[in-house]
Amino acid sequence: MATYKKISGTNVEVVSSDPSNPIKGQVWYNTTSNVLKGESVTTAGAWSSGGTMNTARTALGGAGTQTSALAFAGEGVSEHDLTESYDGTSWTEVGDVNTARVDVGSAGASNTAALLFGGQPPATGATETWNGSSWTEVGDLNTARFALAGAGTNTSALAFGGTPPVTDKTESWNGSSWTEVGDMNTGRRQLSGAGASNTSALAFGGESPGVANETKAESWDGSSWTEVGDLNTGRNYLGGLGTNTAALAVGGKSPTITNVEEWNGSGWTEVADLSTSRRSLGAAGTTSAGLAFGGTPPVTGATEEWNGAGALITKTITTS
């Protein structure tokens, strides 16, 4: 009978912590957790547990990547000004936002460059930019609002939707000020967004007048919004990550769900569910390597990491 050593050329490693960069087919025994683990390739996307946030919260902002993320503002018992940075393993508290608030809009490429805008109470247009160590107040949105969505980076962002009242207004950020641009086709609040810049974004889900759980999605090309394929499951207070051609719609309220859908530029496909049902969560990353964190009910600090099809993932090896 073939042994692991005959197949791989090496013995099973015995280590106190998981290897930082395991390769496909590598197997090791972790003496700290007392489990046998191995590195494999996903045939379909899958969620796994990440490090828990220091402060559980909901209605927060998120930015960055799976291994370089930022979570900020939100609500636990009251509005938070707290910020936490994620390194792919654990969360660390860093500099507070200047104005504590919930139901915020957010954008950003990493845990060293992010943008926070809007929120409540009361409805505000206040905008802050993050440089890796502190938040700085910058130019306000033209329209104060909360329950809005955002996309892009801290120097090239888009803010859209929100309330009160429910709005279709869109604003573009150039690194120093906001400019009103083309309105959305369907005004809505409690929606989510994805996108790489203020010229390329996706808006989806939310609540519009008369429709509690929107399925509509719209794509932004830098000058106007175009309606594209609908979500399979309408929802509001959902998380969103990715770009306008490759995005994830994560969780939400319809009622509160674990459902996740992936956008490929033309349609949505249901993929693996979250382990923890939640709405009003934060999200960051891409459809290859994403992150979901926080949310409610109950208010949680749980973090889940998404690895898309073809990604390397660490799995615990069992006899079942």
Image: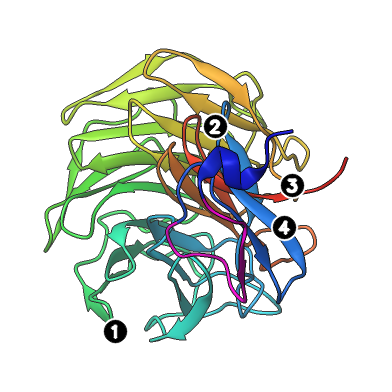
Q: CA distance from mark 2 to mark 4?
A: 41 Å
Q: Residues within 10 Å of mark 4 (few under 14, many from 20)?
A: some
* Of the pair 308 and 238, the residue shown nearer to us: 308
Q: Are marks 3 and 2 in contact (CB under 8 Å)?
A: no
Nearer the observer: mark 2 or 4; the answer is 4
Q: Is residue 289 visible?
A: yes
Q: Amino acid at mark 4?
A: Leu
- In primary-sequence order, the first of circles 3 and 2 is 2
Q: Is residue 154 above or below residue 191?
A: below
Nearer the observer: mark 4 or 1; the answer is 4
Task: Name the residue located 77 percent from the left edge and 69 percent from the top edge.
Answer: 34
Q: Amino acid at mark 2?
A: Gly
Please identify the quadrant where the C terminus is shown: top right
Q: Determine which residue is flagged by label 3.
A: 275
Q: CA distance from mark 2 to mark 1?
A: 32 Å
- In primary-sequence order, the first of circles 3 and 4 is 4
**Badge 4 element:** strand
Q: Horizontally, is 251 left or right of 104 in the view?
A: right
Q: Are marks 4 and 1 in contact (CB under 8 Å)?
A: no
Q: Position of residue 253 (x, y in %)?
A: 71, 41
Q: Position of residue 271 (x, y in %)?
A: 62, 27
Q: Position of residue 201 (x, y in %)?
A: 30, 34
Q: Is residue 23 above or below residue 209?
A: below
Q: Position of residue 131 (x, y in %)?
A: 23, 76
Q: Determine which residue is flagged by label 2.
A: 205
Q: Determine which residue is flagged by label 4.
A: 36
Q: Is residue 163 visible?
A: no
The label shown at residue 134 is 1
| Residue 13 image-quadrant placement | bottom right
The magenta-colored residue range is 10-21
Q: Horizontally, is 250 left or right of 226 in the view?
A: right
